[in-house]
Amino acid sequence: MRSYSRDAGPYSSGYFPMRNSPVVPRASGARVAEWPVSLFGAVMGLSGLALAWRLATRNFGAPGWIGDVFAALAWLAFVALVTIQIRRAVRDPSVWMAELRHPITGSFLGTFWISLLLLPMLLPAPMGMAARVMWMVGAVGMTAFAWFSIQRWIGARQEAAHATPTWIIPVVGLLDIPLAYPTLGLPSLQEPMLFALAVGLFFAVPLFAMIFSRLMFHEPLPPALQPTLLILVAPFAVGFSAYVAVMGQVDVFARGLFYLNLFVLAVLLGRLQGTARGEAFQLSWWAVSFPVAASAVAALKFSVAMPSSLSQVLALGMLAFATSVIVVLLLRTLMGIARGETLLAGAVAKA
């Protein structure tokens, strides 16, 4: 396997490998210009929340401007992060490429492609052609990235410690492809949508089992990677929405995915509660934003298909929870920037 030395990391301070532990990057400061590719996860979270509020507007009469605000924030974050990554790649391409080649942080490149799949759904109807072109680029890029990731995993022996929740991202990215199917009007692409759904759900099963096994039988994840645990919710939340988009109905299988989403979310939120209280805020906490937003979207869709007082209360409760989490993340990030705090992962705990 490729080894990672102190000088090979995505940040100027490099990687700090520890025995029997995943290699975790250490930050050299709080400068926005050093923010990693993984921060596209914030774009995903804001986009997902915007979509959730638009569903709430359509089905529950919620104010439409709330979804528009989060959509605008998602686009602003995307443009800012693309600019930052271009500057990083130009300034120090070897460091930037090392981040993408790393067995843990490399999977975060999928957050960029997923952003390209979510953002088109936030564009106004008159920009339908631009939305379709952007979605097509994202779909092709995400499929290629998933193929590359799986090729890399099976092409060489992998270390068990590297099997972290970030490995789910390429699979979840495939499940994001069908989400725009009803919104963008793509009836001629039903078979490619079914392809993305099938491949995404198929590979989600062994990857989830592998990562779950790693969490049970190996040392805990270091603090910097603890928030990524919630990524394990995404295959069920996004899988539910993707399945409904392709099949056009909430059947028994879809309901099963939704119930799995609820159970896994409850388990992992309980696990993260203590971590959130005991650790200083870091940008890695944005990893929780998309899973909670996707869960809110799934709950809203479920409440429409299976109307009841319980499902509606659950949907609105999950929307309120996702909104609270993402607003706190947004405010805490802006406060950290203003105070010059170190917001990137720092210490490497034994893992």
Image (spheres, grey):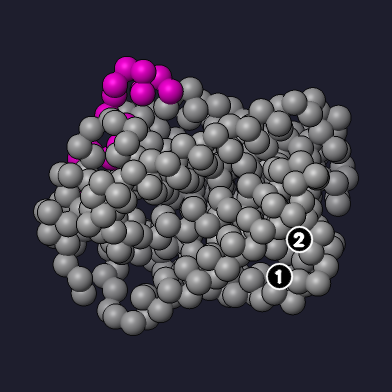
Q: Residue at x 48, y 75 (%)?
A: 147
Q: Residue at x 23, y 32 (%)?
A: 29
1 or 2: tag closer to the N-terminus: 2
Which of these two is toward me, 306 or 111?
111
Q: Are marks 1 and 2 in contact (CB under 8 Å)?
A: yes
Question: Magenta span covers which residues?
Answer: 334-350
Q: How many marks?
A: 2
Residue 313 drawn at (x, y percent) = 77, 34
Q: Could you say whether the residue bearing mark 1 is in a helix, strand or loop?
A: helix
Q: Residue at x 12, y 54 (%)?
A: 7
Side of 304 relative to 332 (left or right): right
The quarter holding residue 32 reads top left
Numbered badge on residue 184: none
Q: Is residue 128 above or below residue 148?
A: above
Q: How far, Cα to Cα, is label 1 from label 2?
A: 8 Å
Quadrant where the N terminus lies?
bottom left
Residue at label 2?
A: 181
Q: Could you say whether the residue bearing mark 2 is in a helix, strand or loop?
A: helix
Q: Is residue 47 visible in the rendered structure shown here? A: yes
**Which SS does the magenta portion mostly show?**
loop
Q: Is residue 224 above or below residue 194?
A: above
Side of 92 relative to 226 (left or right): left
Q: Residue at x 34, y 40 (%)?
A: 35
